[in-house]
Amino acid sequence: HFNKARYLMSAPTLALCPPETGVEVCFAGRSNAGKSSAINTLTRNGKLARTSKTPGRTQMINFFTLGDPDLRLVDLPGYGFAKVPLAMKREWDKNMGEYLQERQSLVGMVLLMDVRHPMQEFDSTMINWAVDADMPVHILLTKADKLKRGPAQSTLLAIRKHLKDAQVDDLVSVQLFSSLKRDGLDQLNQVLQGWMQV
Ligand code: GDP
């Protein structure tokens, strides 16, 4: 179904999102984590994530349908706040918190982190919101091709241990991913299909 992805609409807040029928999966990550590349790889559609990077849409919740209006992929606004005013950060926190905690059709979150800089403050915030809402999270450690196999594997195991120690490993899973090499795509597809029951 993912190759049938089409842009539906963008919404700045939960109140303006499309009707909460069916199921949707959201993609979140700090700016430059590799979110657009991963969405392109998954949907085999280079135009799709560019849609979310269109000026005016970068701070929006962007909706894509997967051949059926009741199956949706959602690209959340990137998060890279170094130069963003505090008021804008607060607004983002409010809108994202509401969407993640109250959206009825949301069944899971794919959280993308650069394998070389995993588990930043933003990532923990997203995991905590999802766990509070009893929603599963699947972490993609992106750009895995940038590390040798050994270091990539140790990062994966360290994060698994961290999730286990935090007692969230029942809801939060993790894998290595490379858009460049198309590595980890089958594993991601399986998780998404499990969530969306297709
Ligand atoms: P976004 O801001 O999270 O949407 O990130 P992008 O998908 O635009 O990627 C940010 C940068 O990382 C770009 O220069 C990409 O070419 C690069 N990138 C993304 N995925 C990969 C990957 O799997 N491997 C490598 N080597 N580079 C990647």
Image (spheres, grey):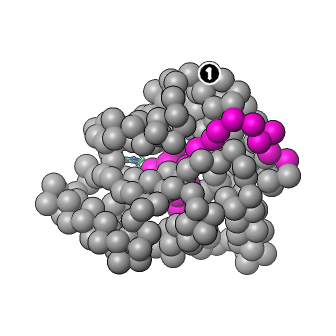
- Which span of residues is magenta-colored? 16-36
| Visible residue check, residue 105 | yes
| Visible residue check, residue 126 | no
State the image coordinates of residue 25 (x, y, percent, origin top left). Answer: 58, 44
State the image coordinates of residue 193 (x, y, percent, origin top left). Answer: 47, 35
State the image coordinates of residue 22 (x, y, percent, origin top left). Answer: 69, 35
Left/right placement of residue 69 relative to residue 184 reads: right
Front residue of 59 and 124: 124
Pointer 1 residue: 67
Indicate whether 70 appears above or below 188.
above
State the image coordinates of residue 111 (x, y, percent, origin top left). Answer: 49, 56
- Give the quadrant of residue 101: bottom right
Q: Residue furthest left?
A: 150
Residue pictured at 72% horizontal, 31% vertical = 8
Q: The residue under label 1 is which amino acid type?
A: Gly
Give yes or no for residue 20 being in the magenta stretch: yes
- Give the quadrant of residue 172: bottom left
Residue pictured at 41% horizontal, 74% vertical = 167
Judged from the image, the secondary structure of the residue bearing numbered disc 1 is loop
Left/right placement of residue 167 relative to residue 148 reads: right
Residue pictured at 51% horizontal, 29% vertical = 198
Indicate whether 131 appears above or below 33.
below
Give yes or no for residue 95 being in the magenta stretch: no
Residue pictured at 33% horizontal, 35% vertical = 186
Front residue of 173 and 16: 173
